[in-house]
Amino acid sequence: MATKQRGRPRSFDRDEALEKALYAFWQHGYEATSVADLTRVLGIGAPSLYAAFGDKKALFDAAVESYTTSDNGTFIDRALAEEPTAVAAFTRILREAAVGYTAPDRPRGCMVLSVGVSATTPEVVTKMRELRAMNLAVMTARVQADVTAGVLPPGTDPEKLASYAGAVLQGMSTQARDGADRELLLRVAEVAAAGFAVSAAGGQVGASGA
Amino acid sequence: MATKQRGRPRSFDRDEALEKALYAFWQHGYEATSVADLTRVLGIGAPSLYAAFGDKKALFDAAVESYTTSDNGTFIDRALAEEPTAVAAFTRILREAAVGYTAPDRPRGCMVLSVGVSATTPEVVTKMRELRAMNLAVMTARVQADVTAGVLPPGTDPEKLASYAGAVLQGMSTQARDGADRELLLRVAEVAAAGFAVSAAGGQVGASGA
DNA sequence: CACATTAACTAGCGAGCGCTATAGAATAGT
DNA sequence: ACTATTCTATAGCGCTCGCTAGTTAATGTG
């Protein structure tokens, strides 16, 4: 809009501040990240924070908004859209989650889950729960699409498979937070993907072991 | 010890109070359950609470202690001890978790997980994390025992399978909290058990589907 | 009965919370 | 230079937190 602003210029970058705030919430949770913590992390005073973002919840909302449109926050949707089948997409999602949940430059685990399960403020709990529900919904729809297209057998249960995938992802996030290393999570992802493929294929287990 | 106590008798039952406190912590988390909440739930004043239990953290410890020795808190150990194989034990654990996490007379999900992931008080976080680590350890040991006994093939990865089972359990707990009904969780448990059995058997997938 | 002992109740402390009134500093327009 | 506008810094508000001093109530014991 206005190329030149009139008064004293802002002493910090808004997007950088949002990212720092997001990481703080991600690491410690919504309530446990106090405004005093935020002013320390962002390197600004409380009045500047309130002038720029409104209040604590508005800052949180803005930070989450920036996250859900970033690469980190959309890896599930991208995999579902880009992979040719649901099984391939889930396999990729699980693998990418193992890597992403143990990234050294980010807090461990899934941001939506970490913040969501620790929050007690109703609006925050609801918002995170809805994000999780949305992820489940798009995964369910992807399986359903494969059933409709004949890629998966007619008896397939999309809700079951999506919930299963979601559960594994949530568990992997928890274990990443508990200190599990990337290599272990990748093995877990591999087991989960195998289980997914078997159940999607009809559930029969060909016991070909030793 | 003393059969007769001297002064004014206590107006509440200690074990009942511990159970009520446990349910409050289970439902809302450690920090979010204030001492004022506890006095309301237990029906006693704050000084009585402090005289009987010490402080908030000691009350929490006592409540958790009573839980980890109850039926709810030991279902994993019982299944691992009673079932003939690791696969049978995990199958039972997953099924019982689906039922237990959706019991109508208890808070939803796993107590250790719900409280653990929401807490920020370091001692509480550590304690819950240790309980989770212990569950992972006994599950790992159970798989290892089957490998040693020749029930599972030599190449089996106990840590991988235990972490996978733990991840699914943790995810089921989260989904129970998110409102998933018992029947869906039972289906998820079934998929997970199938995946577990396949990977334990050596990883080969006999594609015998339609 | 009087007394010691133990528990419960009222009231309130210090600390941290989210948030803001007020005053000062830094810019653009005239 | 002067004003208007916008951001920043100090200080502190009301509230809830975990916790406790001081007092009153209910029991067993002599």
Image: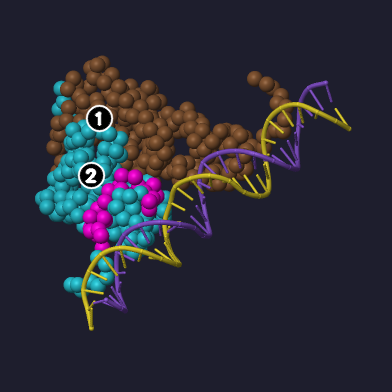
Chain colours: A brown, B cyan, C purple, D yellow
Residue A28, percent across and down?
45, 46
Q: Amino acid at mark 2?
A: Arg
State whether residue A199 appears in this view: yes
Residue B25, percent across and down?
32, 49
Residues behind callouts 2 and 1 on a single chain: no
Q: Nearer the viewer, mark 2 or mark 1?
A: 2
Residue A202, percent across and down?
17, 27
Between residue B36 and residue B83, name the one nearer to us.
B36
Question: In which quadrant will I find the C terminus of chain B?
Answer: top left
Q: Amino acid at mark 1?
A: Leu
Q: Which residue is mark 2?
A: B106
Disc 1 crowd, CA 10 A, few/some/many (<14, 14-19, 20+): many
Between residue D29 and residue B91, name the one nearer to us.
D29
Q: Chain of mark 2?
A: B
| Relative height, residue B35 to residue A130 (above, below) | below
Please report the residue visible at 61 percent of the width from the left and 34 percent of the height from the top: A51
Please report the residue visible at 15 percent of the width from the left and 47 percent of the height from the top: B89
Please report the residue visible at 42 percent of the width from the left and 39 percent of the height from the top: A121
First to last magenta residue range: B10-36
- Asked whether, in this view, residue A102 is left or right of residue B207, the answer is right
Residue B11 is covered by the magenta coloring: yes
Q: Residue furthest top?
A: A149
Q: Which mark is residue A161?
A: 1
Please report the residue visible at 57 percent of the width from the left and 33 percent of the height from the top: A53
Do the CB atoms of the residues marked 2 and 1 lie less than 8 Å apart?
Answer: no
Q: Chain of mark 1?
A: A
Disc 2 crowd, CA 10 A, few/some/many (<14, 14-19, 20+): few
Question: In which quadrant will I find the N terminus of chain B?
Answer: bottom left
